[in-house]
Amino acid sequence: MERYQISVVKCEIGSILIYTSSNVCRKIEFTDEFLPSMGDNIFTKQINEYLEGKRKILDFPVAYSSGPVFTKVWNYLRENVKYGTIITYGELANACGINPRVVGYAMAFNPLPIYIPCHRVVSKKGIGGFTGSKIENAIKWKKYLLSLEGLF
DNA sequence: CGCGTACATAGCC
DNA sequence: GGCTATGTACGCG
């Protein structure tokens, strides 16, 4: 039986849900609702510190899996797109030897936004898009996260 | 193994 | 600003 343990971190524009199981992070999701904070663990701690600007790198244990290319894109992001920097879809695609569209594809399947800094990937024309979850204003989360790092 | 589907772009007018 | 072309990964039978 597999049951997620859910932690909640509140922030300025809503709440961040952290799904964990066996003490590793499986999924991160945004919601517009202001849920009460829940959980006091390494996950909530690091994200809180990140939101306060005290922490620049999230390194709690995670577990995710997908195809080799998606994983490659995600790893590249984590390793090469540090706090306060951005990259365009085109550049990222080029670095991974794939088509820009595929980058968007990989981002849309990204199970761990924030941990994998998909919000630092922007379109050449502007901020680009975002799909944190089903919420309609997902783009505002991207802006929020970018503004946290002093971008845009 | 082959086909259908989906993608948060880039580039040109 | 809006329209079009476009490559690749994934999942399924």
Image: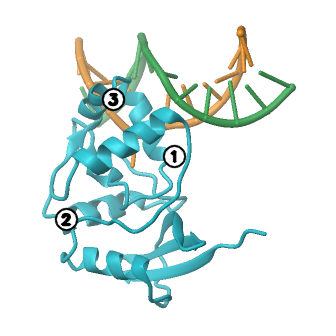
Chain colours: A cyan, B orange, C green
Residue A50 seen by the camera: yes
Give the residue type at disc 3. Cys
Q: Within 10 Å of the Cα at label 3, are there few (<14), some (14-19), or many (20+) other Cα atoms? A: some
Q: Residue at x 16, y 51 (%)?
A: A85
Which chain hosts label 3?
A
Q: Name the chain letter of the residue that bears numbered label 2.
A: A
Q: Are marks 2 and 1 in contact (CB under 8 Å)?
A: no
**How many angstroms separate mark 2 from mark 1 (CA)?**
23 Å
Labels 2 and 3 share a subunit: yes
For the residues labelled 2 and 3, the Cα–Cα distance comes to: 27 Å
Query: Compared to A131, does A15 lie above or below?
Result: below
Which circle's residue, 1 or 3, is located before the other in the chain? Answer: 3
Does residue A4 appear left or right of residue A86 in this picture? Answer: right
Comes first in the chain, label 2 or label 3:
3
Which is more foreground, mark 2 or mark 3? 3
Q: Which mark is residue A53?
A: none
Quadrant housing residue A76: top left
* Residue located beneath label 3 in the image: A96
Q: Position of residue A56 (x, y in %)?
A: 21, 67
**Label 1, label 3: how many angstroms apart (C-alpha)?**
17 Å
Q: Marks 1 and 3: CB-CB under 8 Å? A: no
Q: Quadrant of the C terminus of chain A?
A: bottom left
Name the residue nearer the viewer: A129 or A149. Answer: A149
Residue A126: percent from left, percent from top: 22, 43
In the foreground, A67 or A131 = A67
Q: In the image, which disc is placed on residue A147? A: 2
Classify mark 2: helix, strand or loop: helix
Q: Which residue is mark 1?
A: A109
Mark 2: few/some/many CA within 10 Å (<14, 14-19, 20+)? few
Residue A4, percent from left and from top = 64, 73
Q: Is residue A66 left or right of residue A117?
A: right
- In percent of the image, x 23 and y 31: which residue is there? A91
